[in-house]
Amino acid sequence: MGSTASKEVASTSRNTTAPSVSNEKRPVSVSVNDISDRLANYLTLDDMSISAVNQNPIEFKTLEDWSQKLLEDPKNRLALSAISNGDVSSIVRQRDASVIDKVHVFSDKVELEGSPITNQRSSGRCWLFASTNVFRVQVQKKYNLDDFQLSQAYLFFYDKLEKSNYFLQNIIETVDEPLDSRLVQTLLGDPVSDGGQWDMVVNLVEKYGLVPQTLYPDAFNASNSSKLNYIVVEKLREFALVLRKVSQDKSTSKATLLALKEKFVRTIHGILVIALGKPPSPNDVLNWEFVDKAGKFKAISTSPLDFYKTIVGFKATDYFSLIHDPRNSYKEPFTVERLGNIVDGKKIEYVNAEIDILKKAAIKSIQNNEPVFFGSDVGKFSERTEGIMDTNAWDYSLAFNTDLGLTKKERLETKSSAMTHAMVLTAVNIVDGKPTRWRVENSWGEDVGKKGYFIMSDDWFNEYVYQVVTTAKYVDKQYVDIWKSKKYNVLPRWDPLGALA
């Protein structure tokens, strides 16, 4: 996910498993003529001179001519005066959209939104906050709780440890690739970011379970993760070079490489324990004490795995990701090469669908009182103070005399956009059978948006939502069958759909 408080954009990196290739297909490109349709407009501009054939048209006289013509228009002089002295986003904000975007009224809303609003602080753990914000609602309902949080730090610890092992395993499996190959450089570029994906959550909870936050609260380095990440990443890059060097000796056995890797993972484990504190083991017996809304004290003996399976009771393995990727064929399953967090764990699984399929699944979930995990590009056409996500709320063409013309497909193709942040949908407003706006539970604390909640316009959903996590209850059977087929199209490790929220 794009700010100093959340690091979402900074943590759009990938860490991964090697997918089986026996049943996998290459993605099929979908041809769209958007640029061709616009080309005629560019070629017929009034001020276009075919005779200007210099490779570099930037000359002193040319610049003077351009400026003179631009500033002949009083509107451009006003824009210059305003925008050169202020924040362009504030200046081009549209008042009508601003008024509408502040109305937190919805026709359909989950009965219980999680409480309190969570805060990932200076870390990129949005995916862990989004998933635990979905899970915790089940516990609040079952035990009549006002406030309750699951420990994101617990999952964070084991994710860092597992990703470290996964990275080193990828290094062992790619020792025959040149060090400067695109794949190896991509792996080395970000061995263990804070970010993640839904299937990584599934891997973690199935192996390690869940615990209440009171039993493993955030350490400083969980909510301020940059220094910890620096240390872990530097060590992993060092270990990667050692593994590659050792593997050059053809007499080195696989067992030797794995033993060396285990020693390296143990070093990372020590760093994590010192920085984050020793977490409970999945089968440790823990005593969870709480007071419910009626003021009654309760104590429950449980383990992290038992807490996940019996107390939370959310079967994460039943849920999968619908994505909207206009570059590729719809009704097709996709995965990403060497993206994951646990060796031999669940790989990243996507089913590509048209945007309305994602919306219908989200609406059905909300109407059944289930909040929805979703992934988006939060940094585009959004504002954190009031919590606005609306493509119509800022008119940049008014200021600069040119539209931002890339389509969603083209933004993916040109690296302009990617899935940078995971959040939760808790409400939708439906008019004449169609959604008009959505309520978003964020994880940036109560001081942003309306006490932590954002409003997302349906147009914004169209352009910048890439993923909705759903289950068989909320989507047509054909999409479930596609997911279960496991006949993946394989996207390369550096693909935008390999970005981690």
Image (cartoon, rainbow, N blue to C red):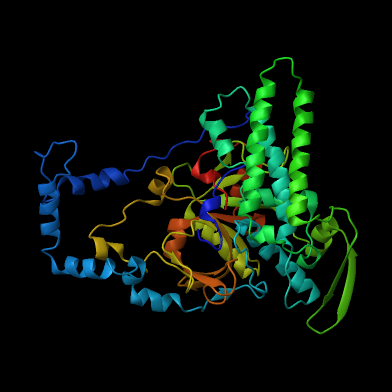
User: Looking at the picture, how far across and down is residue 70, in whole percent?
Assistant: 14, 59
Image quadrant where one finds the N terminus: bottom right
Query: Is 377 situated left or right of 313 in this image?
Result: left
Q: Residue furthest bottom?
A: 294
Can residue 227 be seen?
Answer: yes
Query: Is 208 situated left or right of 287 in this image?
Result: left
Q: Is residue 487 above or below residue 387?
A: above
Query: Is 148 situated left or right of 180 in this image?
Result: right
Total labels drawn: 0
User: Looking at the picture, how far across and down is residue 206, in whole percent?
Assistant: 77, 50
Can residue 486 be seen?
Answer: no
What residue is shown at x 72% (from left), y 58% (from top)? 153
Q: Residue furthest top?
A: 251
Q: Is residue 94 above or below residue 221?
A: below
Front one among 37 and 279:
279
User: Looking at the picture, how far across and down is residue 426, in whole percent?
Assistant: 59, 69
What residue is shown at x 88% (from left), y 75% (from top)? 298
* Picture quadrant of residue 373: bottom right
User: Looking at the picture, how far across and down is residue 180, in whole percent?
Assistant: 52, 28
Query: Is 453 situated left or right of 213 in this image?
Result: left
* Picture quadrant of residue 348: top right
